[in-house]
Each structure stands twice: as C-alpha cells, then as structure tokens.
Image (tube, helix red, strand yellow):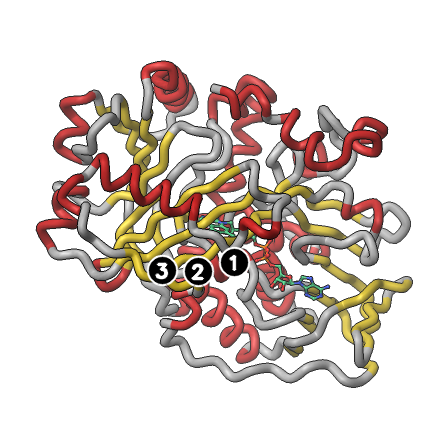
Amino acid sequence: MLYENWLHTSSTVKTSKCLELKEKISTECLVIGGGIAGLHAALRLVEGGKKVVLLEKRICGDSSSGQSAGFLTPQSEEDISKLTAKHGKEKSKIIHQIPFDGVDLIVNNIKKYKFKCDLRKQDSLYLSIKKSHDYKILEEKETCEEMQIPYKMLDENGLKKYHPGRGYRLGLIYPGTYGINSFAYCQEMKNLLLKKGVKIYEDTEVKKIEKNTAITHLGSVESKKIIVCIDKLKAEFDKEWSKKCYHIQTYVAISEPLSKKEMRSIFPKEELMCWDTKWDYAYYRPIMGNRLLVGASSPWTAYYPSYRLTQKVIVRGIDSLKEKFTEIKNVKFTYFWSGLIDVTQDLAPIVDYDRNNKSIQFVMGCIGLNWAAYCGDYAARRILNKNALDLSEFLGANRKFSFSGIFQIIFGKRVSFILSHLKELLT
Ligand SMILES: Cc1cc2nc3c(=O)[nH]c(=O)nc-3n(C[C@H](O)[C@H](O)[C@H](O)COP(=O)(O)OP(=O)(O)OC[C@H]3O[C@@H](n4cnc5c(N)ncnc54)[C@H](O)[C@@H]3O)c2cc1C
C-alpha cells in the first residue's frame, strides 16, 4: 500500500492556489485555519455582510478535514445513552442537536451550491462485535426510543439481510446520514468563499496573536474579531489553550474497485456506513468507483510519531474485515494514510472566548466534520448575534475535566487522556 491521501491526489475539483500573505492588512473579521470549522465560520461571516480574511498554514482542507473518511453522521462519536447519563435528558437533547445541525449545514451547502463531493445517502450501522458489547446497542436503542430518534434494530437474522458479516451480533441502523469526499468538499467551500469575496491566503502560518493582530511569517492581519480554528495547537501559539488539545490517531485505506458481487456480499440490500462498538472502532463504507474505504484507530499510537507511517493498525482493520466477509479476501487495498483527530478530554469540542480578549474566539477539539461545521458556524453567529444559543455549559473552556490541572502537569497529557477513557478502552 502506498502512503498517500488518495482523496487529495484523485480530486477533480479545480481550485486555484491562494498566495501567501506578504503584507500588513486589516479587516473586520479574521478566521485562522482553513479546515471545515474555519471554512464554515468564514461562510457565515461573509453571508452576514462582514469583510473576511482567512489564513491557512498549508492549503484549505489539507489537515484532518481533507483526510477524513467522510462519515457524515451525528451518532458515532459519543453514544447518546452516555450523553443522557452525563447531562440528563433535557440537556443531552440540546447537545445532541449539535451534530445533527452540523450534518444539515454541510448537506445543505452541498445541495444549495451543487458541490461535487460524492455525496451519498448512506444510513449508519452501529455493530456489536461481542456479547459483552451488546448492552451498548441495547442502551442506544432505548435512548433513541426515549428521545424519539428514528432507528432500526437488527438481530442476527436481520443482520443477515443488511450486513451478513461473521461475528456481528446486533446492529442499529440510523437513517438520514451521508458519506462525502471531505477533501472535495473543502475545495468547493474554498471556491465558494473566494466567489463571495473572502480573501484567502494559503501557505500562511499564524505564529501568534498580539492584541487584535495575527502575526504571520511574512505579514500580519489586524482585525476587530478573530476566530481561531487551528489544529494541533502548539504552546508557542498559546500555552493555556494548547493544554486542552489531545489527539486520537486514525488510519484510512482505499481498496481497488470491487466487483458488484463483492460489494453485494457486504451490502446485499443497500449501501451503509458501518462502525463497531469498540472505543477505538473500525469503520468502513463504499465510496466512488465501487471502492471500499476502511478505517481503524488506536489510542496507543497517537503520541508515537514513528507509528504514523506504518501500516500495522490499518492492516489489522482490513484483515479483520476480510475475515468477516470472505468474498473480499483477495481484494487489494492500494492507498492508506493516517491522521490525528484533535479532541478535548471529554470529547466535546470547545468554542470559547480568549480569557484576556473577548474579541478572539477559539474553536478546538472538533471530533467530527459535522461538529467542526457547527462550531465554526456557531462562533461566527456569536459575532453576528444571530440565533446563537448559550452553549457555554457544554462547549465552554472552563467546564470540568476529570484529569486536568495539576494532575496533567505531573503526569502529562498522554496519561491524563488515557486515564479519562480507561474504562471504555478496557471493555
Ligand atoms: C484520518 C481521519 C479520518 C476521519 N474520519 C472522519 C469521518 O469519517 N467523519 C467525521 O465526521 N470526522 C472524521 N474525522 C475527523 C474530522 O476530519 C475532524 O474532526 C474535522 O475535520 C476537524 O475540522 P477542523 O476544521 O476543526 O480542523 P482541521 O481540518 O484540522 O483544520 C485546521 C486547519 O488549521 C490549519 N492551521 C493549523 N495551524 C495553523 C496556523 N498556525 N496558522 C494557520 N493555519 C493553521 C491547518 O493547516 C488546518 O487546515 C477524521 C479525521 C481523520 C484525521
């Protein structure tokens, strides 16, 4: 397998490269970071009548947003049942609405602007892989019922019709979810923003922010309002904010085109996007050209850079899928890549004002495309004073995390993060 982001190299969306910033400029609103969060923040602001500049370190969509597996689903990151247990029914309804709204933001853009990004209606299928995990599916089903979220429950017989892999025990289908090519989506968003008058500078890394001015390596932007949507936030950029950013490593591989028969052996009834009940779940879905996209993650490799280029984790994921669906045992996987998803300790994103300067907002730890779209959009709506609920209880930077503060100083980020998810990792 070749280490290459196939979404990037196979992209057919034409974009012109934006030049780097080499001067001092000023604007009304500055967005830093051209991933899904930054692109959505910029869109909301320019549509709200603001003069907007966007600065991106490399090219728009070059980081997580353009590496993603393109699962556009509200469900995968945090079980609804866990949210309900943590926040109670009423509050979890509010927080659970966020990923739903995030999906809508993305899908509405694709439809409204006719983006070419392989939008596929693919229901989600959440699968129990062992008896001791069945309770996760059953709890999720109960919560869906309570919260009137549509679902379809599949027992072993039902699974035979929809997804007859060996060893799956129970499944829960959620309708209204989609697959997209997220790199193509970012390129389409970039083209749209340029058309709407946003000034985009690529190859432009912001080194730091001084008062209301972002300093880049060759220029600077002074702005009344700033939204920071950058990933892998470093201590040199901001020491306090960098402490709140952790990572989960995940790998994606792309197969050669499958025959119709091979594809039907996995999805006899309809295309689905699937993931399992493990905390570091495996995931897969059909994509353009009758190829299969497979993903796998590991909580243990995130802090070992030497692991990022190795195939070990993804090969394990592919092999386990081939054991479940023997019809594809000879299918070759040609490309793979890995990426780090930024997360916070409790996996919910942060959207908050800088403690010393209320004209700067930080958007970080967006665990999915839809969360990122919502959070960028939400930060922009707060600037425009437009339908922005007060979500500080859920997204505020000062909410309580289990292993932070002095614990993190003594034991480090890696140990703090692993301990805060140890129970899930061990089940
Ligand atoms: C391999 C992989 C698979 C994934 N699969 C899925 C999936 O199937 N479904 C899903 O919902 N989510 C998935 N995710 C997660 C999802 O991609 C992210 O949650 C989402 O893209 C985050 O968007 P973002 O805009 O917050 O961050 P990013 O996309 O990381 O954007 C941040 C941007 O800021 C730029 N930047 C960084 N520092 C600076 C600086 N100093 N100055 C200027 N610019 C800067 C970066 O270059 C980058 O473009 C996946 C992630 C990975 C890595």
Instruction: Give the class, few, some or many, for how many residues have Cα within 10 Å of label 2's Cα (few <14, many ≥20).
Output: many
Q: Which residue is mark 2?
A: 182
* Chain-order first, disc 1 or disc 2: 1
Give me the C-alpha separation between circle 1 and circle 3.
22 Å
Q: Position of residue 221 (x, y in %)?
A: 80, 74
* Chain-order first, disc 1 or disc 3: 3
Instruction: State whether residue 74 is above or below residue 238.
Output: above
* Front-most of residues 184 and 101: 184
Q: Position of residue 119 (x, y in %)?
A: 33, 59
Q: Position of residue 400 (x, y in %)?
A: 74, 27
Q: Which mark is residue 1?
A: 3
Disc 3 secondary structure class: loop
The amino acid type of the residue labelled 2 equals Ser
Q: Which residue is mark 1?
A: 65
Instruction: State whether residue 317 is above or below residue 2.
Output: above
Horizontal placement of 32 versus 6: left or right? right
Quadrant in which residue 270 is drawn = top left
Q: Nearer the viewer, mark 2 or mark 3?
A: 3
The amino acid type of the residue labelled 1 equals Ser
Disc 1 secondary structure class: helix
Residues at marks 1 and 2 touching, judged by CB atoms closer than 8 Å = yes
On the question of residue 89 being in view, the answer is: no
Q: Which residue occupies 75% across, 45% down?
A: 352
Q: Which residue occupies 32% across, 39% down?
A: 274
